[in-house]
Amino acid sequence: MESTASGHTSAGLRWRLQIPWMVAGALIIALRVAALGSDAYSRLSWSSALLTDEGFYIHNARNIVLFGRFSTDGFNNALIMPLLHCVQVVVFRCFGVGAIQARAISAALGLLTLPVFYHALRPALGRRAAGYATLFLGLDHVSLLYSRMALMDTPAAFLMVCAFWCWQRGAAVPCGENPTVRQNAAGWLAGCGFLLGLVYETRGLAAFLIPVAFWITGRTRGRSGVLALAAGLVLALVPYYVAWYAPHRAEIVRVSHYYITRQLLPHGLNDLRGSAVRALFGSESGWAPFLMRHTPVLFLAALVGVFAVPRRRNTNRRMVLEFLALWLVTGLTVFALVRYSPSRYYVLFYPALCGLAGYAVAHA
């Protein structure tokens, strides 16, 4: 009888401990899907693109569904986001054209990101750290509010997290001398490379994760791992080049030239220095002031996580934390050097920021 009573008590305690996580999960879902037609939070970005870019990004998909043709004027942003464009066309054909339908894509992918993120972190960092990291990514208001908008960044971040999960399955698992395990690891790394190709086809700016993956893979898996990663990347990019880039090359080059030379690349060393100073100390447009104003605790915890990477080399935990740290630092560096980096770009490194913060909080 005592054993039975003890079992009931233990089960009841476990159930009560699950209640806060269940409440958090309900909030994560509700806050992403409630009132999707409402205006964006005006203080989320200094850039007026917060009010205009959703319309720009759905322009060509809307044209196809409403008018039966891709282009109706000189603006064709879908040329630089073909994968997301195709998803939008399918959604608009099935559910009608509208801002809510377009935002629902980001909301759905933002929700799908969370379980993938948790399962990518749990084997190396443990349930507690993975749980905190997923909670941060799900409820932090910057990540949450942008996942309610029809922009490129949340879909790209979803694919980045999926690529990270594949990398963790392939590169951060000891292979030893077992040929079957080595073959499986190569398959996962090829899958990571393929997803990184899809990341580029969704959000070209997110390609900063590609060198991160190659560098970490080279350190953990050597030449064979890099070749597997490259094979997957080529498998994604060749069809893109043949079916999309080559037929639209002239216009893609023209549009990309404007974005790269006018918006992103600094115009000389003084401009580069100004971009870096703005990123670190600017009152409005820098990432450091933005993160300290909007997400100070999470940002500082992530920095602690960067410096708390275990010293013991070639462990699963260290490799995963190194990947997250390099993901975050590379993203911050890129957005410190380019001329134009509104806060919606930061969604691309938020998974890494939340992963490192979750690890720091769990091991505080």
Image (cartoon, helix red, strand yellow):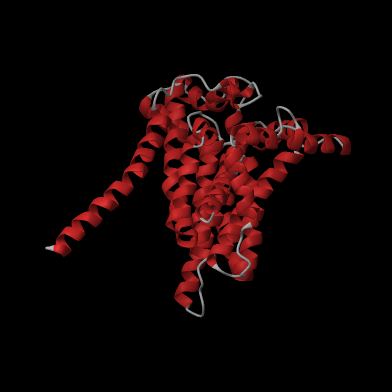
Q: Quadrant of residue 65?
A: top left
Q: Quadrant of the N terminus?
A: bottom left
Residue 244 visible in the snapshot: no
Residue 153 visible in the snapshot: yes
Q: Quadrant of residue 344?
A: top right
Q: Residue at (58%, 51%) from the top-left corner?
A: 238
Look at the picture and state if 206 lies above or below 141: below
Residue 20 pos. (x, y %): 36, 42
Judge by depth and name the residue closer to the eye, 14 or 193.
Answer: 14
Q: Residue at (77%, 30%) from the top-left corner?
A: 262
Position of residue 110 in the picture relative to residue 297 (left or right): left
Q: Quadrant of the C terminus?
A: bottom right
Q: Residue pushed farthest left?
A: 1
Look at the picture and state if 40 lies above or below 294: above
Judge by depth and name the residue closer to the eye, 246 or 41.
Answer: 41
Q: Residue at (49%, 57%) from the top-left corner?
A: 166
Residue 146 pos. (x, y %): 53, 31
Q: Residue pushed farthest front?
A: 2
